[in-house]
Amino acid sequence: MMETTDIQARLVQFGKHVDDERAVRAGGVLNREREAPQAIHRQNVTARKPRTLRRGAFVARAAAVIVLAGAAVGLWSMVNRSDRDGISVSAASGEAGEGAGLFPAGDVAAVVEAGFDDPVSVTNRYLKDRVRHLPDRVDLVPTVGLTKTIDDDLVVVGFSLQGTDDSGDGYALVERVGPEPGAWVVVSSSIIGFDVPTISYRDGSIDGTLSTSSGGATLVEIYDANTNALITTSELSQPAVDEGTAEVSFSIEGIDAPSVGVRFWNIGDLEHQGGPRANFAEVRLYDGDRDVNAGWGPLAAAANAS
Amino acid sequence: LVINEQSDQLRSLDSFLVQARPRLERALIARYGIDDGLDAAVEASAYALEHWDRLRSMGNPVGYLYRVGQTRGGRLAQRWKRIESIVQHPLTCDRIVDVDLQRALLQLKPEERIAVVLVYAHGHSYAEAAEILDVPVTAVSNHLTRGLARLRTILER
């Protein structure tokens, strides 16, 4: 049987080895401890990636955060992404004036100031905010349920919306966009069955496809993710369920914002469905994002990943 | 007067980093491996410079900086899961040192691994490990007991 002292002796040797490696890496890390703080700061600033790479990193995130595991591998071959149970994570935009997510609105500084300390609290408030502004004033009561931690900074939160004659379960993807307490923000959400197989934002135009199991009409609202100002709305008509639901393509032009929140609310049609439904999806996009897979599919894949 | 105040601030930050940085680096290396751990420590130190006024008023600034480092390192977690050693590509020798031990350490829970490495490999006190993990000393004691027992089991297989 191996003695504890043997293991401890091996650990001591390992510790020395780690310190030796620390000493020779990055220009002598041990020496860096003796440097003035300004020098450390300069090293870090120089090491930061330029903006173009940050955007590339965001695209990687959008691909995997919001994207089905493996489904969009070909789409993202140009970006440097890492797999994480089908989810790749890179930094959200930390640029001033670019929205960090869907809720709370605003850039990273604004999100931190809003101060949601955990994924559940921000999802709860997000849902309460959204159901207050439902099309045609549907009364829905949100309930936040279980969470699935993807990593230290990314969590999928399950929720339910209960209405008088309708209900739906869904997921929200919540991200911590900074180290400070209160940096959690909702970046994507969807009710079961509401898929946005592909959506892109470039040259002032949002193009994509959507599919819902209920058919009917869907209201699309585009918000500036930084200011939360409504930029434009559009109504899309889908075939009714009994006519065979299919993906519907859409294109909305004339958008001028570095980051947007795209809200899809399926408002149904009275003839086929008897009224509005608790059926929606929402996603954050940055100008330049291409072929993001949003909606229910990728969120469910993330929530159910082992 | 302003210059003197700034100098005092920098001196206090410098003093803090000289004390805290080795422990911060060792903890982040144990958490994320040598390369990503050092990157995370650099970012945490830069954060300390930018937010020193706020940080110095905190009860546990080094624990907070560890969390800052985690934000950076956490983004690399999947790559970390796939590697087989903490010092994956050593620069000070030709091959990985005690690869069995490093593999065994990677099978511990992160908090157990960090506690074991800080205390047994680097000689930090229980209190110092507790401070950086922002947990009570009793929790560190539990991590060490369980971590060492698991290490023994893994290494005896």
Image (tube, coloured by chain):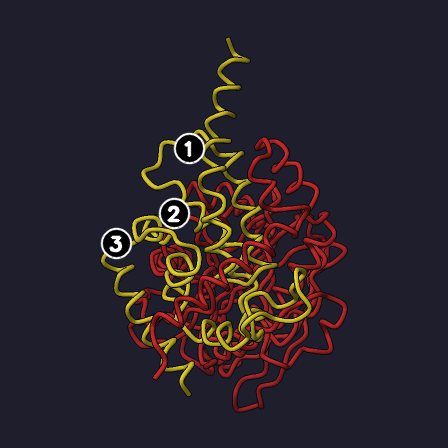
Quarter placement of the N terminus of chain A: bottom left
Disc 3 to disc 1, C-alpha distance: 25 Å
- Which comes sooner in the sequence, label 3 or label 1? 1
Label pair 2/1, CB-CB below 8 angstroms:
no
**What residue is pinned by disc 1?**
B54
Circle 2 sits in a helix, a strand or a loop, which is it?
A: helix
Chain letter for mark 1? B
**What residue is pinned by disc 3?**
B137
Q: Nearer the viewer, mark 3 or mark 1?
A: 3
- Which comes sooner in the sequence, label 2 or label 1? 1
Looking at the image, residue A170 lies above or below residue A31: below
Residue B63 has which mark?
2
Query: Can see residue A54?
Result: yes
Looking at the image, residue A107 lies above or below residue A247: above
Q: Residue furthest left?
A: B138
Letter of the chain shown red in the rendering: A
Q: Nearer the viewer, mark 2 or mark 1?
A: 2
Left or right of A141, for residue A249: right
Which tint was used for chain B?
Answer: yellow
Query: Can see residue A277?
Result: no
- Which comes sooner in the sequence, label 3 or label 2? 2
Circle 1 sits in a helix, a strand or a loop, which is it?
A: helix
Looking at the image, residue A185 lies above or below residue A148: above
Q: Residue at the location (35% across, 70% down)?
A: A5
Residue A52 has which mark?
none
Q: Residue at the location (45% across, 42% down)?
A: B20
* Mark 1 residue type: Arg
For the residues beneath circles 2 and 1, the answer to whether they share a chain is yes
* Mark 3 residue type: Val
Whole-percent x, y for residue A151 in the image: 47, 66
